[in-house]
Image (spheres, rainbow, N blue to C red):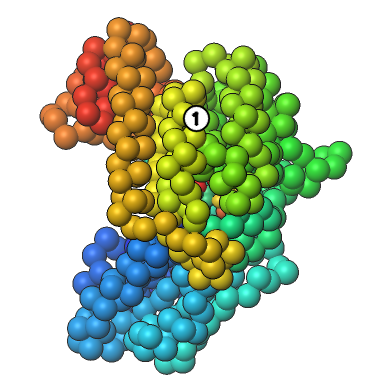
Amino acid sequence: MTAPKKLYVKTYGCQMNVYDSERMTEALAGQGYVATDSADDADMILLNTCHIREKAAEKVYSELGRYKDLKAEKPDLRIGVAGCVAQAEGEEIMRRQPMVDLVVGPQSYHRLPELEARARSGSKALDTDFPEDDKFAALKGRGPKARRGPTAFLTVQEGCDKFCAFCVVPYTRGAEVSRPVAQVLDEAQELVARGVREITLLGQNVNAYHGAGPGGEWTLAQLIRELATIDGLARIRFTTSHPNDMDDDLIAAHGDCDKLMPYLHLPVQAGSDRILKRMNRKHTAESYLRLIERLRAARPDLHLSGDFIVGFPEETEADFQATLDLVEAVGYGSAFSFKYSTRPGTPAAERAQVPEDVKTERLQRLQALLTRQQRALQDAMVGREVDVLFEKPGRMPGQMVGKSDYLHAVHVTDTAIAPGDLRRVRITESGPNSLGGTLA
Ligand code: SAH
Ligand code: SF4
Ligand code: F3S
């Protein structure tokens, strides 16, 4: 028997890339690869990349630059680029960095074993098709049946048809596609059998899910209700959602499905209707606020999270103020905010740009407000009892860390707790990034 080859995967970008990296690692296990966390002893390095902002894409090239010497020392080392930069730039990557052997897009990574074999034989291997074959059917099950951690991602939907004027995702991930219900349920069962207690359903527009199921196409709410019947699965989450795809049943599920957690990531991007229109978001600030009201009517303790872009082309101080007003009106439990980054090929790239120093200043103001809100909601947990799913040991001896229903990190020092335990915790303190407590 030959010794296993070592695979080093580095993941950038969103949770969907985290999921894809797991699946690619599983696919290459069939080619005799085992995962390593050091690039230095790898036989294959695979960068799973993100193209969302300029900095994200540039990181890939600087990382590849670091592997030049390694490749010179080890001619058998193979270097691959996967993910959204691979999709966006294709062959260009090999032109800029000739040491790259393999480029594979997010829709064709089920063909990785073939591509690896081609790269191994000394040829260049490129696949950035949007093939007709079902990637997930080709990937089959989730590989070795070993126990795994208590939380897992499960991609149920991919791609985006929304074409927000700033965003590359519709070009890198292609059109919206939903996985069939049976395939999702099988994968969830498999994960639960391996020790998973919390599943986060993933999609670039996960609430646009419309997978083929018994009786016709199912919605995300139907899928969630079915998943909730799986014994041993304690928690369900989903991300990322678009406000326009939040249907009545999904809103209702937040109130009547116990396993669906009271936390929702619902990006709005901006608070000015003028800017929302230019962004092609197809909703207004008012319609978003009304939607939040309905969600809170269904689940009063719902924690909301959002994404924001500041300095979108033509954004004025008054437009930006409208974003601050919207944030004030909602009160976010957590949020991600970014300076607008020009992406070649997207409509907004051609428009009048906001100066960099203005973007920087607006981002600081927005982040100060969001941090204040986040901190206030976190501090308000002190004195309350919450359920915590423990995941792993903390930094202090005897400490375990996990997540509350609201996705707050919680640490408890108690040797009676094991990973995978779901326990009631009384919160006693609120630190910069986490809560502390004792078993209730
Ligand atoms: N599908 C999700 C997430 C898309 S990418 C959604 O629709 O919400 C994650 C976030 O990156 C976006 O919500 C947006 O806030 C940000 N983003 C996307 N393109 C960007 C750009 N060109 N510049 C800055 N931020 C961007
Ligand atoms: Fe990008 Fe908009 Fe699609 Fe989200 S909805 S992935 S921001 S185009
Ligand atoms: Fe990035 Fe692609 Fe995700 S561009 S955010 S890795 S969908």
Task: Tell me: residue 7, above or below residue 202.
Answer: below
Furthest residue in direction bottom, as rendered: 122
Asked if residue 27 can be seen in this view, the reply is: no
Q: Is residue 211 left or right of residue 336?
A: right
Task: Tell me: residue 23, above or below residue 193.
Answer: below
Task: Tell me: residue 373, above or below residue 86.
Answer: above
| Mark 1 burial class by Cα count in 10 Å: few <14, some 14-19, many 20+ | some
Q: Which residue is mark 1?
A: 326
On the image, the x and y values in percent for residue 332 come to: 43, 27
On the image, the x and y values in percent for residue 422 come to: 40, 22
User: Which corner quadrant holds the C terminus?
Assistant: top left
Q: Amino acid at mark 1?
A: Leu
Q: Residue at x 45, y 61 (%)?
A: 353
Q: Residue at x 71, y 68 (%)?
A: 133
Asked if residue 310 can be seen in this view, the reply is: yes
Q: Quadrant of residue 138?
A: bottom right
